[in-house]
Image: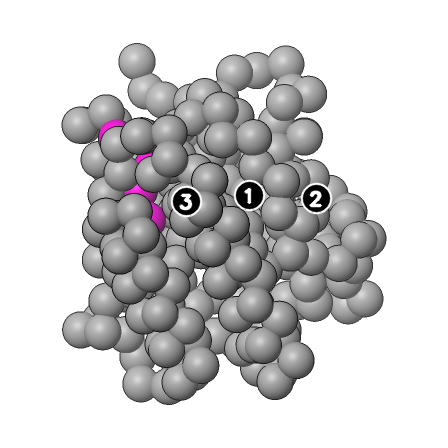
Amino acid sequence: MNPIIKVIIPAYNEQDSIGHVLKDIPKLVKEVIVVSNGSTDRTEEIAFEGGATVLKEERKGYGYACLKGMDYIASSKDSTDIVVFLDGDYSDYPEQLTEIIGPIIENDYDMVIGARDKRFRESGSMTTPQIFGNWLATTLMKLFFGAQFTDLGPFRAIKYKSLLALEMEDKTYGWTVEMQLKVIKRKMKYIEVPVKYRNRIGVSKVSGTVKGAIFAGVKILSWIFKYSFK
């Protein structure tokens, strides 16, 4: 039996990119949920026209948007086997979703991270603060927890039952690292899959601003140190 796969896409003012993202998502996906995180442009309209379920979350924050999508899935009548998280800026290659979910279906992994491998990364697609932040976070996770992560990439898949077991709570930039830390702590089975990465359409709301980059860095490090002393 084929697994039921649902995709959650947090989106804030991604009218120029969301249509491309939706078009490239493989047809095996049961439902795509676009969570508009206070968008003021045509993101919601274009997402709806592209066949997505569109939700609104006015509280700003990546985690808020992801939690909104999870609440929706929990309230749905049909079942869910795998949840995929994907950004709405078209920096990832949605067609690689089949590669992301592969280890879950074939080898019973709980979570798969799409690692933005330098070999397949378009020049300029990740800023210097992003690259350093990823290196620092994954190095600390290896040092403190013996983790084998190389990236905090947002393109990821996880068994729905495993996702629920994590009891996710971060509302903003700490969402990705919280998930990875909790997977380690709960001794779940995880793996990374190298993925391509290109320059996003539009300006990043996190790495594109000094304030966003600093806040994200603080949140990520706070989660790591919080768990290192538990």
The crowding category of the residue bearing disc 3, from other C-alpha atoms within 10 Å (few below 14, some 14 to 19, many at least 20), is: some
Disc 3 designates what residue? 181
> Cα distance, mark 2 to mark 1?
10 Å
Vertical placement of residue 2 versus 198, above or below:
above
Tell me if residue 19 can be seen: no
Residue under label 2: 54
Residue 203: image x %, image y %? 59, 80
The residue range painted magenta reads 109-114
Q: Which mark is residue 8?
A: 1
Magenta region includes residue 78 = no
Q: Is residue 53 left or right of residue 81?
A: right
67 to the left or right of 93: right
Which of the 4 image quarters holds residue 5? top left
**Secondary structure, magenta segment, majority class:** strand
Secondary element at tag 2: strand
Look at discs 2 and 1 and give the one toward the viewer. 1
Crowding around mark 2 (Cα neighbors within 10 Å: few <14, some 14 to 19, many 20+) is some
Q: Residue at horizontal 75%, vertical 58%?
A: 60
Q: Say if 133 sits above or below 98 in the image.
A: below
Query: What whole-number distance in Å separates the C-alpha atoms at marks 3 and 1?
Result: 20 Å
Label located before the other in sequence (3 or 1): 1
